[in-house]
Image (cartoon, grey):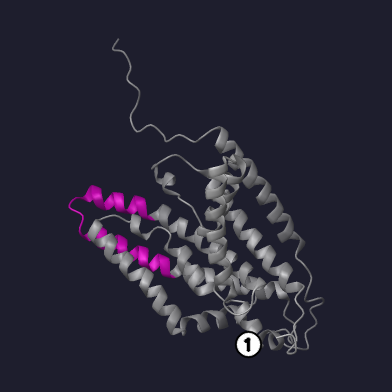
Amino acid sequence: MNAALFVAFLSQRATSPIRIALAALVTLPGIAIAAFSGSLAALAGSAGFLALVFGAGAIGQEVSSGVLQLTFARPVTRSSYVFSRWLAAGTMAVALAWIQLAAGAALVAAHATSGATAGAVAAAAWPLALEHVVQGYALAAVIVGLSALAGGLGDVALYVLGIFGAQILKGYATFRQWAGMERFADELIGTLQGRLSLAWLAGTGPPHLADLVAALSTTALGLALAVIVLNRKELSYASG
Amino acid sequence: MPRAERPCGDTRRDPLWLVVLAVLLLAARVGVTLYEDQHPPVAPALTAPMLPLP
């Protein structure tokens, strides 16, 4: 990891009006829904979406703008570049999701009628906070991996195409009764959407270890893909 | 940024540990998923089973 690249990426994302607007579009209504419904369920999954917002174009935009050629004129390893981008996008998403969770939990607890309800809010909040960490860094790895494959914001197009393609594949496999293919497509959808629930840590629902292992695997695969692709990318102003 | 004069070797080497970790986690993922398909996890009982009175 390169601290200078990490800080530069955070600063760049924090000063992007469109990304901040998109982040606000996710976080603020989530807090309002949690306050009105008296439940933190509305806040699940926000770290994943925020990771997509902050991670989109992490590598592709630098390739398209010609910044990478200048960056790699320095003795920076390409893997440390990828790790810095991933860590920055994930950290920003998790931090914002935690702020949202803290605000939501405070409002729900403030409206709680009894001490027992406030205790239940706290019990539900910590698995969600852990869920944000795993999911945020997993989806940051997915979008960074896709960003190494396509220039500009092509990673967003690849992401959307991936979800639509997997949905179509799942529908077709269901129609043809191909159980194995249906399971594979469902796993692909879960990977791209960052499907994860750690509510079982608080004793709610059965423990699904598969989702947790899948999220960790997605993180490693996304990073490995990004590093391997970037290591083989020939950069020149002529290649665009 | 590190100083340009500082030698850092090959800047395009693939981190072997990451590839190994990704393969191991993928294998664990397939294993755990298949296991949970065969043995679906059950929620812990919230109440104790009833026992006959002595």
Give the x, y percent position of residue A210: 55, 45
- Which quadrant is home to the C terminus of chain B? top left
How many marks overall?
Answer: 1
* Segment tinted magenta in the rendering: A96-125
Find the residue positioned furthest to the front: A176
Give the x, y percent position of residue A44: 40, 57
Left or right placement of residue B42 versus residue A214 in this view: left
Measured along the vertical axis of the image, is residue A12 above or below residue A139? below
Q: Quadrant of residue B33?
A: top right
Q: Is residue A44 visible?
A: yes
Residue at the spot x=66%, y=82% of the render? A63
Find the residue positioned furthest to the left: A113
Mark 1 chain: A
Give the x, y percent position of residue A18: 44, 81
Residue A121 in the magenta stretch? The answer is yes
The chief SS type of the magenta part is helix
Residue at the spot x=35%, y=23% of the render? B49
Of B15 and A158, which appears nearest the observer?
A: A158
Measured along the vertical axis of the image, is residue B35 above or below residue B8? above
Of A61 and A120, which appears nearest the observer?
A: A61
Give the x, y percent position of residue A117: 24, 50
Which residue in the protein does label 1 denote?
A65
Q: Is residue A186 visible?
A: no
Residue A174 in the magenta stretch? The answer is no
Amino acid type of the residue that numbered disc 1 sits on in the rendered structure = Ser
Left or right placement of residue A147 versus residue A160 in this view: right
Q: Quadrant of residue B52?
A: top left
What kind of element bears circle 1?
helix
Measured along the vertical axis of the image, is residue A19 above or below residue A207? below
Packing grade of label 1 (10 A; few <14, some 14-19, many >=20) is few
- Which quadrant is home to the N terminus of chain B? bottom right
